[in-house]
Amino acid sequence: MTSFVRQAAAWHRPLMVFVWAMAGLAVVSAVGVFADERVLVGAPIWLKPFKFSVSLALYGLTLAWLLSLLRRRSRIAEWAGTVVVAMGVAEMIVIVGQVLRGTTSHYNATSPLNATLWQLMGTAIMVLFIAHLVLGVVVLRQPVAERASRYAIGLGLGLTALGMLVAIPMLLPGQAPAVEGIAGAHSVGVPDGGPGLPLVGWSTTGGDLRIGHFVGLHAVQVLPILAILLGRLFGNRLDGVTRARLLLVAGGAYGGLTILLTWQALRGQPLLRPDALTLGVAAALVVATVAAAALVLARGRRPEVALAA
């Protein structure tokens, strides 16, 4: 762990400073959840800064790690990372500032100031998305030694971009509730702030667009971790091509899950109460994933392993 911390300290400095700042904010927000009795939209007022700071810390650390893998220094990628930091800081300033004011940051157009801050957040998110795409293109243009790792990084960055895009329905005019000054919502079919799952707050009475958004955003961590585990646990039994193909299967399944969860939410269904159609599509996704993985493994068995069996 000490060695890892020393190595990480030499990664992209703005991103690493941002990671430590978000980690500190997460601690402060966690204390606020218990110390501040205020409730906003059905949740402790400091819960949103806590969730966002944790998510941004993980995202920043992942991007810094990806930049450390580049064999050649890329000023474009480094600038893109710095832009991500700037936009993340702008977003968190608005979120924390609105908490201190005792009001919401998202969808809040109830006053000229609130509307301006909400527009600022929207602009920051768009710029961050573009910076993410630029960084992803630069990373993928440089060679990665192992094909499975290359697929994991590429699919992770791409699916994280998808996770950002599936949040767009939260902002559509039809998603905005009939409340003056409110421009959008997380929930579908029910008002925001109703009964929800512990910690995450995802609606248990209606659809919730944050679920697909959350799953997609963390693809950039999940798929590289899967690639590392495949290499560590099965590196002696599966060749590089087989591991790469398994990563493709996993990426396809992960993207399908992101879209499925978003589709379920748009139809106003709680995560834990899917209808028969949602269950049928989910079952088809599981069967297709298992079948594809089995086919890859059957084709990829090494001759010496097959003989030993």
Image (cartoon, helix red, strand yellow):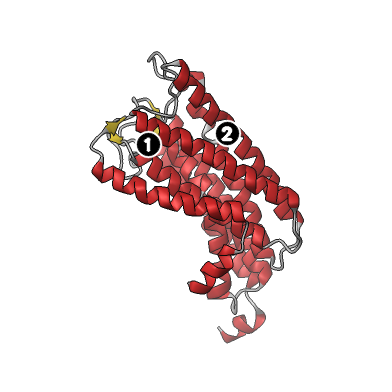
Q: Secondary structure at mark 1?
A: loop
The C terminus lies in quadrant: bottom right
Tell me how many marks there are: 2
Question: Would you call the spot at circle 1 few (<14 residues within 10 Å), some (14-19), or many (20 or more)?
Answer: few
Q: What is the secondary structure assignment of the residue under circle 2?
A: helix
Amino acid marked by disc 2: Ala
Q: Position of residue 73 (x, y in %)?
A: 75, 58
Please say if 61 is above or below 217.
Answer: below
Q: CA distance from mark 2 to mark 1?
A: 37 Å
Q: Is residue 284 visible?
A: no
Report the mark closest to the observer, 2 or 1.
Answer: 2
Q: Is residue 115 left or right of residue 104?
A: right
In the image, what residue occupies the spot 41% across and 47% down? 25
Task: Give residue 141's mark.
Answer: none
Q: Position of residue 211 (x, y in %)?
A: 43, 41
Question: Does residue 100 appear to the left or right of 150 in the view shown?
Answer: left
In this rendered view, identify the residue nearer to me: 277 or 121. 121
Q: In this orientation, does residue 186 appear?
A: yes
Which residue corresponds to the image point at 56% horizontal and 46% vertical from the top-left? 255
Pick the residue in front: 173 or 2.
Answer: 2
- Kindly identify which residue carries mark 2: 124
Judge by depth and name the residue closer to the eye, 124 or 113: 113
Which residue does the image show at 41% across and 36% down from the upper left? Answer: 96
* Residue reaching furthest to the bottom: 308
Q: Is residue 35 left or right of residue 122?
A: left
Name the residue type under label 1: Asp
In this view, 176 is above or below 168: above
Q: Which numbered disc, 2 or 1, marks the residue that appears first in the sequence?
A: 2
Q: Position of residue 127 (x, y in %)?
A: 63, 35
| Camera-side residue of 51 and 18 | 18
Q: Which residue is mark 1?
A: 275
